[in-house]
Amino acid sequence: MHNVRNDFLSRPVIYIDETWVNANHSPKFIWQSSTSQGGLNVPLEKGSRLIICHVGSVDQGFIPSAQLVFQSKSTVDYHEEINSEVFKKWFLDLLRSILFCDTDIY
């Protein structure tokens, strides 16, 4: 048991999360001088969507080569594409770490 505890305490603490970004993602408002003629030139449609999953720690930041990024094939909630098969394959390729997950179900 002592060896297991020491092994457990020597592992890095890693956090995991996921998000998405649309190709035409932009702020609704920008700072602009009163003499400027410019403005945002963004298409009305959202464009294609990337799904992004990554892991990181307080000490190490994002873990190199641990990200999962792919283009969505759907316009509905991105959680439909992060299913248990996709998550499990990605997860098993990650570091052997202590991992704190949010409440999303895969």
Image (spheres, helix red, strand yellow):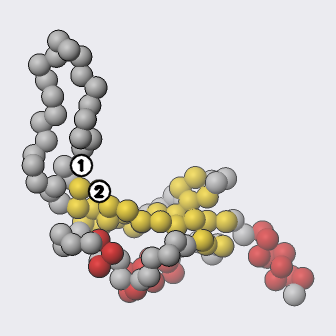
Q: Is 29 situated left or right of 93 in this image?
A: left
Q: Residue furthest right?
A: 2
Circles 2, 1 touching at the beta carbon (< 8 Å): yes
Q: Quarter holding the N terminus? A: bottom right
- Residue at the spot 29% in from the left edge and 56% down from the top edge: 21
For label 2, the crowd category at 10 Å Cα-Cα, with few meaning under 14, some 14 to 19 and many 20 or more, is: some
Residue under pointer 1: 25
From what the image shows, is residue 78 above or below residue 35?
A: below
- Residue 61 is situated, as x and y percent measured from the top left of the image, at 58, 52
- Residue 46 is situated, as x and y percent measured from the top left of the image, at 16, 55
Residue under pointer 2: 21
Q: Between marks 2 and 1, how big is the CA–CA gap?
A: 7 Å
Q: Is 36 situated left or right of 103 in this image?
A: left
From what the image shows, is residue 33 above or below residue 1?
A: above
- Residue 31 is situated, as x and y percent measured from the top left of the image, at 28, 26
For label 1, the crowd category at 10 Å Cα-Cα, with few meaning under 14, some 14 to 19 and many 20 or more, is: some
- Residue 19 is situated, as x and y percent measured from the top left of the image, at 37, 62
Q: Quadrant of residue 41?
A: top left
Judging from the image, what secondary structure is the residue with disc 1 in?
A: loop
- Residue at the spot 27% in from the left edge and 41% down from the top edge: 27
